[in-house]
């Protein structure tokens, strides 16, 4: 039993950035193993953007894992905030949401998250249920529990205050309301990104203040880097892979990531065990497996997760066909010439054709490309510049005209 | 007409510390003179302390004056705040008020303020009427209208923030709620002490934001100094004269103020014109009127205002009788003796009695006082110390026994 619990905990802690009150999590897992008792895990989601990307799935996968060990997931849609609109008034895209839009968004969320979460162990909640009927005086009482200086310690507030960028007073209320959700939901664990630490701890603080008899543990997941390998994956930065993206796009984007980032994705997204991943990495490093192959494997795993194995295979085939056609080798020979040159002569000089007449014939038949674009004009002069010349599928040369 | 308006304005501006948007006040007064149109003047009062003192009456008298020129006074009891309790949790005397206590306090207020205000032109209001039914989301919308940095510019907040004294986030809500009162009350002018400037301007700001079609002018009254002549009159400092205090106490306290402070009280409390006051001051400075007499005049005016002329006269008589009896002249002759001395001999040595036997008779008849206390024991020995000896009403001596 001890071993089982220990294994579960190791699995749970994989890739986690920080845990507050790990002891409590151990207790919850133990109770599940020993008595089958369930516990409540909360994670909040923005009601305006039901477009999940792989960055979100890091969290969702961890919640799915917890569902195996007794968690009832409270998938919270923060619609109360959404129905109020943007507190700063600056974000024009954040309009007030109607009840209908919120419900429609909730359906979209469900379609997406139930690819990962177990619907039988998930409750979708809306914080308008308790915040919508809250009175101003209850909100005022809520605000007596926290002070201004501590609120200004939140990193983004501190930065904005110091750099004299305005902070609306309403923005001070949101962390409190989000924390109050934990009071109303009586959750045992709240999960979120590392950037949410302040708000996650607020829930713990308010559960204590309101004396609900428990204080939530907090689990923080790292922020998944986007395709660029540098910034956090986000829709606004365009460096994301959406869980509803077409299989081919998903596959292609996965293959575009760097070899370094690939291992990060393995750790945070793959369902392979850490041992399997370590073995794979070793094989790649020893040259026994090509990095591209390892990348294809994680790409296949992800596409399969959201679209099934058939679609994943099709995506892979399509990708390889297109890329085999379009690919330009990395090691093409470079030629130079000192003045503008006729394309047929250039092809001969670079050794791609036997004669200018053969070159002209190939151009006419559409077998010659200049910078990946088919050449139509057999009289074309190449002026100063750099060119990639291509004859047929496999013959390449680079030419620099000075 | 112009003259009448100008005179009214001069009267209104007497003793005022600051006016924001004087033009609007001029317009309101003009409209009253020309068309008989009334306007709304708001002043807010604390629901927990219906014990008005002269400091409050500076404001009330100005409002009473405005009532002569078209003002409908909105006497606002801030009961919503009172029913929530103290935001800081530190002020133990500020308990949550029940509806019953609030209403009882309102009655006490009325008894007091209608000695000054015209009941026919006064509306007593409670901000729980509109704030009590306010939803949390309306309050959040209210908080979007102001930012943290500007709130921290309020002097007391700034001081506390800089000196790392906690400010509850709820305290940021109170100025907004107070300002929102002006929106709900649609007032044209708000009055308050100079220490309320930030909150008074908030009302103007919010009326603009909520687009109610007017922006209140603001009139700030100086804070009346208390009996000490230094600190603002306040109950907690004990330097106050309450409007419900007994006539004799009121009269006595008025006579205890310094000659300098007396003129301040004349300016802010007397209904004498500034010309009359200037004349009086001149007469005092020229020695034609004794300062004590001028002080008695303002004391009589104030006591008459709250208790009527009869009571004021009685208070004056009582005061003079008591003080005439008890008064010890400032220029009593000082005697010394080198060893303890029998009281009868002391009286003879100081020249208050002809003989020790006469002294003993006077003591027996109760005509001798030692330090203002009747001497009962004719054998009394005066040990080391300083004594005031008194025979009858008018004979005094000081004796130092070494």
Image (cartoon, coloured by chain):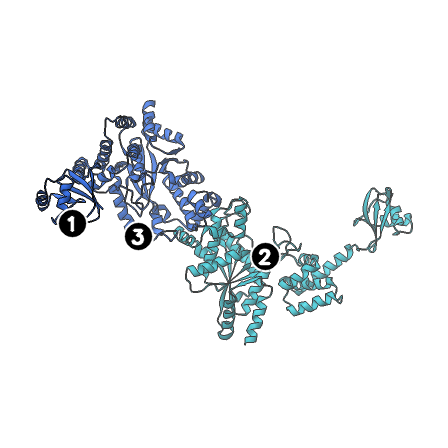
Chain colours: A cyan, B blue
Give residue B51's position: percent from left, percent from top.
27, 44
- The N terminus of chain A: image quadrant: bottom right
Image mark 3: chain:
B
User: From the viewer's perspective, is the residue at label 1 or at label 2 nearer?
Assistant: 1
- Residue, disc 2: A52
Image mark 2: chain:
A
Question: Badge 1: few (under 14), some or many (20 or more) residues near its Cα, within 10 Å?
Answer: some
Image mark 1: chain:
B
- Residue, disc 3: B98
In the displayed structure, does residue B18 sit left or right of residue B55? right
- Residue, disc 1: B381
Residue at 73% x, 62% y: name it. Answer: A291
In the displayed structure, does residue A49 sit left or right of residue B45? right
Image vertical order of residue B401 relative to residue A284, above or below:
above
Q: Earlier in the sequence, mark 3 or mark 1?
A: 3
Q: Secondary structure at mark 3?
A: loop
Q: Are marks 3 and 2 in contact (CB under 8 Å)?
A: no
In the rendered image, which quarter is residue A292 located in? Answer: bottom right
Q: Secondary structure at mark 1?
A: strand
Q: Residue furthest bottom?
A: A1
Give residue A121's position: percent from left, percent from top.
52, 66
**C-alpha separation, residue under disc 3 versus residue under disc 2:** 50 Å
Residue at 30% x, 46% y: name it. Answer: B49
| Marks 3, 2 in one chain | no
Residue at 87% x, 52% y: name it. Answer: A352
- The C terminus of chain A: image quadrant: top right
């Amino acid at each position: 039993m001890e071993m089982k619990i220990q294994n579960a905990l190791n699995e749970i802690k994989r890739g986690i950035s920080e845990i507050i009150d790990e002891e409590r999590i151990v207790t919850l897992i133990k109770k599940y193993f020993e008595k089958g008792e369930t516990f409540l895990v909360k994670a909040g989601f923005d009601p305006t953007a039901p477009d999940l990307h792989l960055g979100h799935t890091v969290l969702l996968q961890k919640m799915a894992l917890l569902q195996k060990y007794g968690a009832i997931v409270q998938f919270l849609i923060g619609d109360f905030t959404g129905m109020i609109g943007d507190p700063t008034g600056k974000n024009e895209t954040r309009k007030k949401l109607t009840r209908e839009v919120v419900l429609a968004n909730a359906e979209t969320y469900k379609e997406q998250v139930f690819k990962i979460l177990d619907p039988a162990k998930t409750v979708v909640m809306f914080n308008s249920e308790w915040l919508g009927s809250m009175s101003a005086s209850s909100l005022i009482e809520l605000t007596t529990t926290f002070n201004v200086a501590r609120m200004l310690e939140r990193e983004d507030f501190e930065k904005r205050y110091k750099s004299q960028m305005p902070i609306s007073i309403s923005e001070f209320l949101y962390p409190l309301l989000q924390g109050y959700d934990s009071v109303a939901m009586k959750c045992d664990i709240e999960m979120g990104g590392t950037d949410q630490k302040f708000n996650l701890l607020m829930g713990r603080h308010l559960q204590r203040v309101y004396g609900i008899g428990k204080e939530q543990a907090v689990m923080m997941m790292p922020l998944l880097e986007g395709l660029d390998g540098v910034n956090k994956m986000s829709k606004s930065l365009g460096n994301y892979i959406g869980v509803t993206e077409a299989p081919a796009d998903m596959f292609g984007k996965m293959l575009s990531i760097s070899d370094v980032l690939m291992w990060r994705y393995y750790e945070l997204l793959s369902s392979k065990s850490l041992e399997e991943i370590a073995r794979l990495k070793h094989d790649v490093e020893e040259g026994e497996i090509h990095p591209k192959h390892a990348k294809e494997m994680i790409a296949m795993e992800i596409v399969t997760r959201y679209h099934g194995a058939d679609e994943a295979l099709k995506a892979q085939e399509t990708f390889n066909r297109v890329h085999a056609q379009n690919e330009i080798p990395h090691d093409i020979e470079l030629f130079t010439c000192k003045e503008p040159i006729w394309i047929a002569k250039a092809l001969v000089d670079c050794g791609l054709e036997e004669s200018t007449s053969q070159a002209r014939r190939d151009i006419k038949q559409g077998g010659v490309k200049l910078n990946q674009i088919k050449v139509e004009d057999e009289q074309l002069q190449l002026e100063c510049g750099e060119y990639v010349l291509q004859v047929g599928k496999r013959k390449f040369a680079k030419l620099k005209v000075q």
